[in-house]
Amino acid sequence: MRFATPLIPATLIRRYKRFLADVLLEDGPTVVAHCPNPGAMTGQADPGARIWLEPNDDPRKKLDYGWRLTELGGGHFCCVDTGGANRTVEAALRAGAVPGLDVSGGLRAEVPYADGSRVDFVLGGEVFVEVKAVSLSRAPGLAEFPDTRTARGARHMDDLAGVVAGGRRAVVLFLVQRTDCDRVGVAADIDPVYAAAVARARDAGVEVMALGTKVDTVGVTATGRLPVELPPLSS
């Protein structure tokens, strides 16, 4: 997934109302940028952080800048745009870069299923794939989801379990949108309800996968499977 326009650096002043951020551009002006992340953004939205913005001249958009990356130090980046995760995964799927997931039978996006839910992708009519953008890390090398409570995420896990019960295959795919992590886990202390839903879904046969990414000022590219650290399946 490539950014539509070249990114420009800025300094974060503050994030507020979840979707807004005051930022200081390198050439001096302070502007308001759109923050495309409804989560807690722990460690990614500290005042003074060096961030990267995507300018736009779309008259339909209220703001001229969208926040895309936060620098983490040590040459690492985190993509804060949760909406870009599906584009990254779709590109990887179409390139055949996700072992175990084959799109030769077709790929559909945002497919209605269950009771009022939509699944991110259906492959060949039989494989349902739900994507989760992961940006939280509280321990070296470990990415975690979620970073805040998500009733919607728990419902999705139960919906995927229903897919398996109906005789089809279901996958939850964690996309790690930061470059300093090499494994993934579920943040049960942040959202025990979601963690329990993941456990139920795994017991029901839902597959849990994770992808790492290369993140830079050009774009975000999936780099391959990462291990997922979850409790053992129930006996």
Image: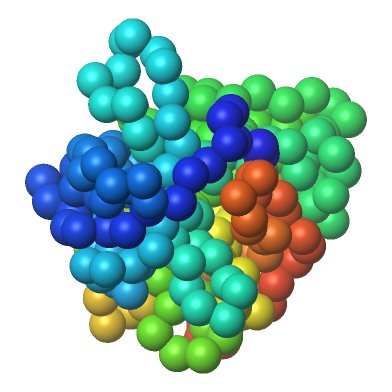
Quadrant occupied by the C terminus:
bottom right
Residue 188 visible: yes
Residue 180, image x and y in percent?
59, 77
* Nearer to the camera, 17 or 157: 17
In the figure, is residue 43 to the left or right of 222? left
Q: In terms of depth relative to the viewer, which is nearer, 7 or 208?
A: 7
Q: Where is residue 71 drawn, in percent x and y?
A: 47, 66
Residue 105 versus residue 213 in the image, above or below: above
Q: Nearer the viewer, residue 185 or 76?
A: 76
Residue projecting furthest to the bottom: 140
Q: Considering depth in this image, is 185 or 105 the residue closer to the camera?
A: 185
- Residue 127 quadrant: top right
Within the image, what quadrant is residue 106 found in? top right
Residue in the image at 54% along x and 65% along y: 77
Q: How is the image coloured?
A: rainbow
Q: Residue furthest front?
A: 27
One can see residue 146 in this view? no
Q: Position of residue 188 (x, y in %)?
A: 33, 79
State left or right for residue 233 relative to residue 198: right
The single residue placed furthest to the top in the displayed view is 59
Viewed as shown, does residue 138 lie left or right of 103?
left
The residue at the point 41 percent across, 16 percent down is 57
Answer above or below: position of 119 versus 233. Answer: above
Tell me which residue sits at (12%, 51%) in the image. 16
Q: Split into 4 quadrants, where in the image is the N terminus?
A: top right
Relative horizontal placement of residue 209, taking residue 151 as reference (left or right)? right
Q: Position of residue 133 (x, y in %)?
A: 48, 54
Eyeballing the image, is 230 above or below 12?
below
